Image: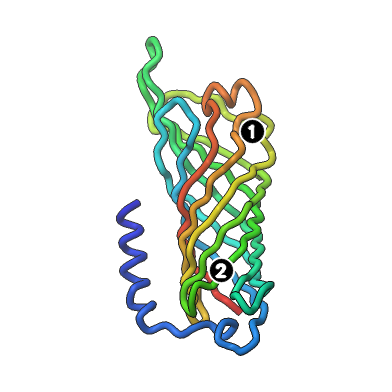
Amino acid sequence: MQKYLCSILFVLIPLIGHSQIHRAYNRPDAVKSYFLKGGVQYTTFTGSSDLASFQAGWQVGVGMKLPIIRRYSWWLQPEFLYNNYKASLSYPAAGALPPYESTYSFTFVEMPLLLSYRANDLFELQAGPQIGVLLNNSASTTTKQAITRLTPGDLLRWNYGLCGGIEINMSPLAFGARYSYGLSKLANSETAASQLGEASLHGLQVYGAMVF
């Protein structure tokens, strides 16, 4: 994870020094804008009794920025995202079974609704709720240990959470980092609870966007 973050910072720092403010922000009157975004996310579980670790997933989506209090630089930012979360759990030995690690993957359509504050002409702070719908899931293990496949019916269909972060606005690009914290547990059956316990998802998202 640190290797990816250092690589991203190495690219962003020179760009920030030579950036221009996006046209939607330097006009006398604030105007709405649209964007396409994509990035990576490093996710893990919280609430599980087993040892959790981060794994890399991805996200793509669209969104818009709507000025709501122009004098004080407040914006409303709804998004429509296709998110793939991955996280791992390490299970201890049980009887004759050796310890093993399983990596779980969850794909959601998610809709954050963010309140954004433009701190200055370059940086923007964002926070708000998000809701998601589970599309599919999978699991794999690094050993030959067989794991029970979880169907979408074993997991909660709806996922609720909170997210917040910072965005750097350039012309015509934007880059950001956002922390996402799930408020809903994933398991919806005894089978899922035996593997995931009370786990929910949380982690860091790093993205880039093209603003129009």
Q: Read off the residue under disc 1.
A: 155
**Extreme residue toward the top, this view:** 95
Tell me: residue 113, above or below residue 35: above
Q: Mark 1 is on which residue type?
A: Leu
Tell me: residue 6, above or below residue 162: below
Q: Nearer the viewer, mark 2 or mark 1?
A: 2
Task: Report the residue at 55% width, 62% height from top.
Answer: 126
Query: What whole-number distance in Å separates the C-alpha atoms at marks 2 and 1?
Result: 35 Å
Total labels: the figure holds 2
Task: Report the residue at 46% width, 36% height from top.
Answer: 103
Q: Mark 2 is on which residue type?
A: Tyr
- Label 1 residue SS: loop
Task: Report the residue at 69% width, 39% height from top.
Answer: 157
**Extreme residue toward the bottom, this view:** 28
Q: Is residue 100 left or right of residue 139?
A: left
Task: Report the residue at 49% width, 43% height from top.
Answer: 86
Residue 84 in percent (x, y) is at 55, 49
Which mark is first along the chain, 1 or 2? 2
- Label 2 residue SS: strand
Q: Read off the residue under disc 2.
A: 117
Residue 39 in percent (x, y) is at 49, 61
